[in-house]
Amino acid sequence: MAAIELEDGAAFDPEAFKTFVAAQRDLGPKWVPRYVRVTEHIPLTGTNKIDKKPLKAQRWDTPDAIWWRPERSDRYQPFTADDAAALRAEFATNERLNILEAPA
């Protein structure tokens, strides 16, 4: 999941994001983010680095807007509560729920 912070007053444009990512010559197709979290403020450490721990701990259980690309799709769409339930069910089906419960 990629986490982005927009400038004040800006809105996430999934098509513009897709175009931006496609223009990154050093970003292979496997590295294109499937999930994009749009947050008001990216948490920072005391040394002004991105604090990934709270982002990892919250995963998709956040009030922030999340966009995603379903499998075999290149279009981003809003990640809904139904999508979150389906993702959790996929973890359960594959006996991987322990990953969601582990400390981030």
Image: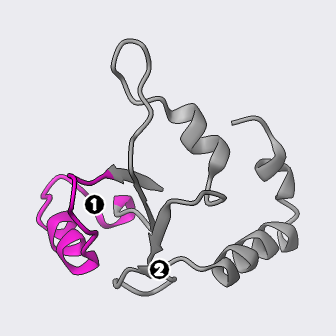
Residue 26 colored magenta? Answer: yes
Which of 36/33 is in front? 36
Distance in Å between CA atoms under marks 2 and 1: 23 Å
Colour scheme of the rendered structure:
one colour
On the image, the x and y values in percent for residue 21 come to: 21, 64
Q: Residue furthest front?
A: 9
Q: Please say if 5 is above or below 70.
A: above
Numbered circle sitting on residue 28: 1
On the image, the x and y values in percent for residue 57 come to: 66, 42
Q: Is residue 55 left or right of residue 78?
A: right
Foreground mark, 2 or 1, reads: 2
x 45%, y 86%: residue: 72
On the image, the x and y values in percent for residue 59 come to: 62, 53
Q: Is residue 75 left or right of residue 37?
A: left
Residue 10 colored magenta? Answer: yes
- Amino acid residing under circle 2: Pro
- Amino acid residing under circle 1: Gly
x 40%, y 30%: residue: 50
Q: Residue furthest top?
A: 47
Tell me where residue 102 sits by quadrant: top right
Q: Please say if 49 is above or below 86.
A: above
Instruction: Check disc 2 and report its element: helix, strand or loop.
Output: strand
The quadrant the C terminus occupies is top right
Tell me where residue 49 sits by quadrant: top left
Q: Which residues are magenta?
A: 5-31
Numbered circle sitting on residue 78: 2
